[in-house]
Each structure stands twice: as structure tokens, then as C-alpha cells.
Amino acid sequence: MTARTKAHNLQVATSLYDFIEQQVLPAVGVKSDKFWKGFSDIVTDLAPKNIALLAERDRIQAEMDKWHTANPGPVAAGKPMKAYRKFLSQIGYLVPEPRNAKATTANVDAELAKLAGPQLVVPILNARYALNAANARWGSLYDALYGTDAISEADGCEKGTGYNPRRGAKVIEYCRYVLDRCAPLKSGSHIDSTGYAVKGGKLVVTLKGGKTSGLKDAKQFVGYTGAASAPASVLFVHNGLHLDLQIDKTTPIGKTDPAGVSDLIAEAALSTILDLEDSVAAVDAEDKVLAYRNWLGILDGTLSEEVAKGGKTFTRTMNGDRHYTKPSGKGEVVLHGRSLLFVRNVGHLMTNPAITWTDKSGATREIPEGIMDAMVTTTIAMVDLQKKKSHPLRNSRTGSVYIVKPKMHGPAEVAFADELFGRVEKVLGLKASTVKLGIMDEERRTSANLKACIAAAKSRVAFINTGFLDRTGDEMHTCMLGGPVMRKGDIKNSTWLAAYEKSNVNIGLQCGLRGRAQIGKGMWAMPDLMADMLKAKIAHPLAGANTAWVPSPTGATLHAMHYHQVDVPALQKQMEKAVAKQDPKKLREETLDKLLQFPVVSKDQANWTPEQKQQELDNNAQGILGYVVRWVDQGVGCSKVPDINGVGLMEDRATLRISSQHMANWLHHGVVSEKQVRATFERMAKVVDGQNAGDKLYKNMAGNFAKSAAYQAACDLVFKGKEQPSGYTEPLLHAWRLKVKAAA
């Protein structure tokens, strides 16, 4: 039984109440009664609105189910699509585009508004991940290249256990080419450099043979450390991003380098999302307190972690700012040492037992978790807002709080989020629109009405970001009764997806986000396949996105190279002009005709071979089990999970939503049988058990199907998948996790 403390109309788990009373409120100078009275009033007023919005989702889905039952199969372009769109407008799914949807967001930090670079997303429950991500603003390009498959191991360049000089030479060569591309010399190449010095406020590079050269663009040299005649580092800027050339002849690498260069430090993860949502398993007060405590710790600079490496122990903390001497030798250049931090709140769907409230009928209900997150994370963020300009660990330098708001369905739900944060600001005495929102474009109704969504929070929008995985899960659930969904691999080439990716950027530019907010793209989910990422992920900046998600600090360092190859702000300016020349009405018509094509096939097209069907089942079942077993048994919300081919994938609830909805759909339409699915789950459970053989905390599923909570949860996700709200996995996952915790 959870001990609770009464606070006005709220019954708060005492552990959470004490944390807020003893650690949060004193840190930000907000009086206790003001906080709890304001919080209680917000819940009393807005929880019913929250509930009504969820009922609206259910109403719309019921209408969609009726329509798909009466009109099975895909919708062809032309008259069928016209009729379908008319229906969507009639049921309130599609709303008219607002005339004035221009964002007015002010006081947005440069990392989001002006610059282009990688973005990390990490679970806030894990202090190590949070600290690593916050410190991933700067990363060693030497380490990133040497330690990954970005550099081939062919021709004697294996990573091995110790330092391989041949591999090291490849890394050094690669980085010199980076310098040639990003900070080229007037004559000669950085490959031939033998020394770097600062003379008369300019960089002088000595080359083989004794000749010297300067930069083609002298303004790219912006600072140095150490002595001008023999600097310890040289700072370049290119496309708004910095590169820090480290020079140290005492290091193993510097000793062998003609110029003494020991590393190239790249400005990498410009921003990071600390996640309370998709990547965490936070189901009760205990979990929420840990999450909130880490958010407080990272903002006040006290979060730390003891790390043991190579027989030594050290304490990892937040990096300070980076200081350089200006080229003239007078004055200082100070660069932000950490990633700019967002916190991702929970969406509108879930409730949490950490706080209950009493509704008008006298019934006791769990609080909407998104309301709880809004109040608590914003209050904690005041720690940062109250820092002096001289503080070495400031997050926002413009006085903003950055909160990602996920899984909103359409403009009414965005308007609700805007109202919610407005109410929180009033309670806390913050200026209107202090809280800036990241609007995830990851639900079909949001994609189809994106301009209206931006207009609903136009003074708060700090980013829009595509979420292909969740968006696909929503597609599947929305068209569940329309017919068999394509194989997952085929969806990547479907009409709606290309339209979705293109529309996101176009609408962002139409709404004035250039220079004001991020337009983002989704995750590269394979942290071990960096060579492939370097080939593929340049597509994101080339599409006009000024950020894209990466799975690790190393991934951020490597992906940063793409933003040196593409000047995204300049590209956005060109694209903005091109979009402005198009007829907005015609553009919307063309976009919607493609965007609203759902990924189902007709019954006669569902003619996959038995082998293809089984392959799809194996893939889905293994992915579900591999992820769920850690979530339910161990409370791990995001982890690198080996797929069916042994490739490590960063799995979260979005991937789970797709796989479970896909299997539920094929079951519903008789593509596969229940017997076949259950047999697949049992066989894949053995595979997953084998993949986790080295984990001491792991509980085998095979031979224990009746007692394994994880296995039963995985089966529920499929066999009860059709009835899950919008196909989300959270309600089932949370219920099973709470059972496991209660039994512990």
C-alpha cells in the first residue's frame, strides 16, 4: 500500500511529496502551498479535458473502423481518395488549414534556432547515459573513427586489443581530409602539415618542405589555447560548428604525428532530449522520483556517477564551458561545453499511481501523467532559469525551458498542451511562453494537420520532428480493419512515408521555423553500424532538417560530419523560397493525396509465401520478446537489443508498437493463425534466452511460459493488440511491470 500525503485535491505518494518539498521547492524558491494549490487546481480543471481528448481519439477510431469495414483495401488516387478525404473532414479527423500559422517563438537558444547538428535521446532514469549525452557536445573524432566500423579493418587495420598503428594512420588521414574540407588552406593540404602557430592574429601552417600557408578563409580560425607560437589546440568554425585541433607531442599519437596533432575534437550533439517517455519504464512514484531527481541533478550540476575503468575509479560530472584565447591574443572565446537539454514529458494517454485526485463525481482517479510531468519538470527547470549569467553550467542562455511533448493527435491536443503549460507558468510566476515545446509529428492526425498543430502552439514551438516508427504504428492501428498491412520492409517504400518526410520540412519552413526552431528527423537505430550511418544519414541534412537523432555520443560525433558537408541553414533558405512560390492550396492537396494512403493491401494481394509470412512473424516476435523481457522484468525502457540476425538495435516502445500491431493485423485478417503465432513466440523465446545468456539478472522464458510475466506481456501485446488505444503498448507494459514490482 502506497503511503500518501494529502495536498488540496491531490493524494500524493509520500516519497514524491517529500522529494518535492525537501529538494525541489527549496531549490527554486516556490512556496509549498502556492505550488500544491496551483497543481491541484490545474488537475481539477484540466484532467477532465485530458480525458475528453482521449474519448475523442476513441470516437474517431470507431468511425475509422466502420469506414474500413465498409471500404476494405487501399484507397486509390482520384475519386476514392476524394471520398475518403471528405469522410475524414466530416468526422473531424481533417481540419482546415489556418491562414496564419507563422511561429512567433522567441528566446530560443542558438543550438535550436540557428545551428544544425545531431541530437541525442537518452533515458533520464540512467544517470550515466544522461551525463554522457550532456557531455557529448564535444567528441573525439579520432576515437569515433578508430573504435567503430567507420574505418574498415581490411589490409591490416584491425581494431584489436591494443593500438594498431596502421589503423591509427587511417584515422589520422581521415581527419586531415576533414580539415581540408572544412578549413582548407590557401595552398597545400593539412595532410602535409608539420606545425601550427599563431602569428599576427592569423593561423600559420607549416608544410612539408618548410613552406607555410594560411587558411583560405582566415575568419575560420577563431581561437586557440596555450602559447601562440606552439598552441595546445586550434579552434576552427565551419557551418556554425567548431572543430578543435588538439596538439600534444607527449601522447602516443602526437609523438608520431609530424605536426604533433593528437586528436580532432568535433562539436557534435548540439542538443539532447532527456527522456521521461518512450525510453524509460517509469510506472510508479519510486520511478518518477528517480527520473525527476536526475533532471534536477543535471540542471543544478550535482548529478555525478562513479566510473571504474582500467583499474581506476573516477567521478563523471557535467563538463564546463570551453575557453580559448582570441586569435588576436587579447580576450576570450567561451563555448558552451554541454548539449542543450530538453526533457521529454509523457503524452496525454497515460495516468500514474504516484498521484491520485478526486473528480466531480467523488471518484478517486490516477492523475494524467502528462499533467504531472508538466508541473514537476517545469518547476525543476527554474533551477536553470535562476542561474546567473556567469554560472559555468547554464543550460538555456535565453531564459527558456525546453520540453518535448510526444504522441499528440491533432491540433486540439496541441492546444491543450499549450493551455497546460500556460497554467503551469502562471502558478510558478514565469513569463508566458517560457516553456518551449518540441512537437513530435509521430501520429497520423498530427501529420495531416501539422500546420494547424504548429498554429496551436505558435509561441512555444521549438521543434517539429518526424517519428517514423510511432507514425507507422499509428498507421497500422488506424487502418487495422482495412486489410492486411504490408510487410514491414515494404512500408519503407510506401507512398505515405515519402510524403510524410517531405511534408514535415515544407510545412516547417512555411510556418517560419527557419532561424527560430528545429526541423528534425528520426533515429539511426543501429549503433554498431556507423559506416552505414555515414552513407545513409546525410539524407537528413540534405532534406533540409537541421537536426536528426543518433543512438550514441559516438554516433553524434560521426553524424556531425554531415553538417559540415551540408550548410543546412543556407539550404533551408533556398527551400523556403521554393516552397513560397508554390500554391499552398495545391501543395496541400497533393501532399494529402499521398500522405493519407495507408499501407494495406487487398485480400488477393496478401499472397506472400509461407516462408515470407514466417520470416515476418519470426522477426516481429523476436523483437517483441527481446525488448519486453527487459522492460517488464528489469524496468529497462531502452536498450541495445540484438535482432534476429544478431545486429544490435536501439529498441523502444515505438518499435514495439509496430511489431505488435503488425502481428495483430495479420491475425485479424487471417494471414496467419493464432496457433502459428504462439508457436513462433515459443520458438523465439528460446532464441532470446540464448541472446541474454550472459545476463545474471535475466529470467528465462522458455520452459517457464505460464509464470514468465515478460512472456505473457509479449503475448498480450499481440493477442490484445487490436483493442489497445491507438495501438500503444504502454497500458499493458505498465500493468505487467507493476505486477512484477508488487511481487518482488
Image (cartoon, grey):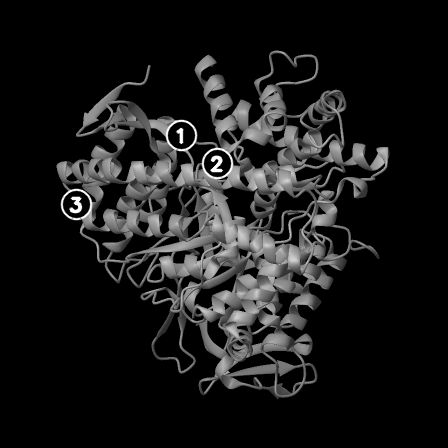
Query: Picture coordinates of residue 359 (x, y %)?
Result: 25, 28
- Marks 3/2 in contact by CB < 8 Å: the verdict is no
Where 719 sits versus 91, above or below?
above
Q: Which residue is mark 3?
A: 29
**Dot placed on the residue nearer the N-terminal end, 2 or 1:** 2
Identity of the residue drawn at 41% across and 48% down: 405
Q: Label 3, label 1: how many angstroms apart (C-alpha)?
A: 25 Å
User: Residue 605's image quarter?
Assistant: top right
Q: Label 2, label 1: how many angstroms apart (C-alpha)?
A: 9 Å
Where 417 sits versus 337, above or below?
above
Comparing labels 3 and 2, the label whose residue is closer to the camera: 2
Q: Which residue is mark 2?
A: 280
Q: Is residue 574 visible?
A: yes
Q: Label 3, label 2: how many angstroms apart (C-alpha)?
A: 29 Å
Identity of the residue drawn at 52% across and 65% down: 546
Query: Picture coordinates of residue 101 (x, y %)?
Result: 40, 66
Where 517 sits versus 272, above or below?
below
Residues 349 and 644: in front is 349
Query: Picture coordinates of residue 282 (x, y %)?
Result: 43, 31
Q: How many numbered marks are there?
A: 3
- Marks 2/1 in contact by CB < 8 Å: the verdict is yes
Q: Which residue is mark 1?
A: 287
In the rendered view, does 249 fall on the left or right side of 528?
A: left
At mark 1, the secondary structure is helix
The quarter of the image holding the N terminus is: top left
At mark 3, the secondary structure is loop
